[in-house]
């Protein structure tokens, strides 16, 4: 009897981890504009959800099942976020303000495949260079490291653009020609 109860707890926990991971991925796919993939994922998500909830509701008198459901939900959020980090869908825009004006910095980053737009800027302590750099999210940490190598005192702000239109660099990425 105890083996059956532990098995039920394990199954409910596992089902909810998978369900919430799918839920998290679906939400991110929806936000990133992957409509059809999100719809497909949601179909699987709902089946898993109904099975898991059904197991809990059929055995509502067993408090351990409810606890397993709640714990599985929490773990599923973390697992879903980790999966999303690994997928790294979309692009980021990185705004960089350098400590000193260095004409070679944008050129170096362009040669490494990053889309860079730069201009002269003025700060409290004098002339600076401002750059806007576009890159796929999967290269985010590599870009941070590279900027810090080139200018350890650079001021960096990152955001995700909602949509991107035009520009030669985006066309190169879509053709799979990013130099990495």
Image: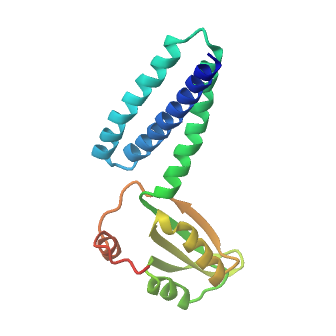
Q: Is residue 81 above or below residue 19?
A: below
Rendered image quadrant of residue 136: bottom left
Q: Residue furthest top?
A: 61
Q: Can residue 160 be seen in this view?
A: no
Residue 95 horizontal/vertical position (percent): 54, 68
Q: How many labels does the image show?
A: 0
Q: In this view, does 94 lie above or below 120?
A: above
- Image quarter of the C terminus: bottom left
Q: Is residue 144 left or right of residue 112?
A: right
- Image quarter of the N terminus: top right
Q: Which of 114 and 132 is in front in this view?
A: 114
Q: Is residue 63 above or below residue 89?
A: above
Q: Is residue 144 above or below residue 46?
A: below
> How is colour applied across the structure in the image?
rainbow
Residue at point 61%, 68% (across, down): 156
Rendered image quadrant of residue 75: top right
Residue 8 horizontal/vertical position (percent): 56, 23
Q: Which of 160 and 173 is in front in this view?
A: 173
Residue 33 horizontal/vertical position (percent): 34, 48
Residue at point 58%, 30% (across, down): 10
Q: Is residue 13 visible?
A: yes
Q: Which of 165 and 120 is in front in this view?
A: 165
Q: Which of 35 and 8 is in front in this view?
A: 8
Residue 86 horizontal/vertical position (percent): 50, 57
Residue at point 40%, 81% (across, down): 179
């Amino acid at each position: 009897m105890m083996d059956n109860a532990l098995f039920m707890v394990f199954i409910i926990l596992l089902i909810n981890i998978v369900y919430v991971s799918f839920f998290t991925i679906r939400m991110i796919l929806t936000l990133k504009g992957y409509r059809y993939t999100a719809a497909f994922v949601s179909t699987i998500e709902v089946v898993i959800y109904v099975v898991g909830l059904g197991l809990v509701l059929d055995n509502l008198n067993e408090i351990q099942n409810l606890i397993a459901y709640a714990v599985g939900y929490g773990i599923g959020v973390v697992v879903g976020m980790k999966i999303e980090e690994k997928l790294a869908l979309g692009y980021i825009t990185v705004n960089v303000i350098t400590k000193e004006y260095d004409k070679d910095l944008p050129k170096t980053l362009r040669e490494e495949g990053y889309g860079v737009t730069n201009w002269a800027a003025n700060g409290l302590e004098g002339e600076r260079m401002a750059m806007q750099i576009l890159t796929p999210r999967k290269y985010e940490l590599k870009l941070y490291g590279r900027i810090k190598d080139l200018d350890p005192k650079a001021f960096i702000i990152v955001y995700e653009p909602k949509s991107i239109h035009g520009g030669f660099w985006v066309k190169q990425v879509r053709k799979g020609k990013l130099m990495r």
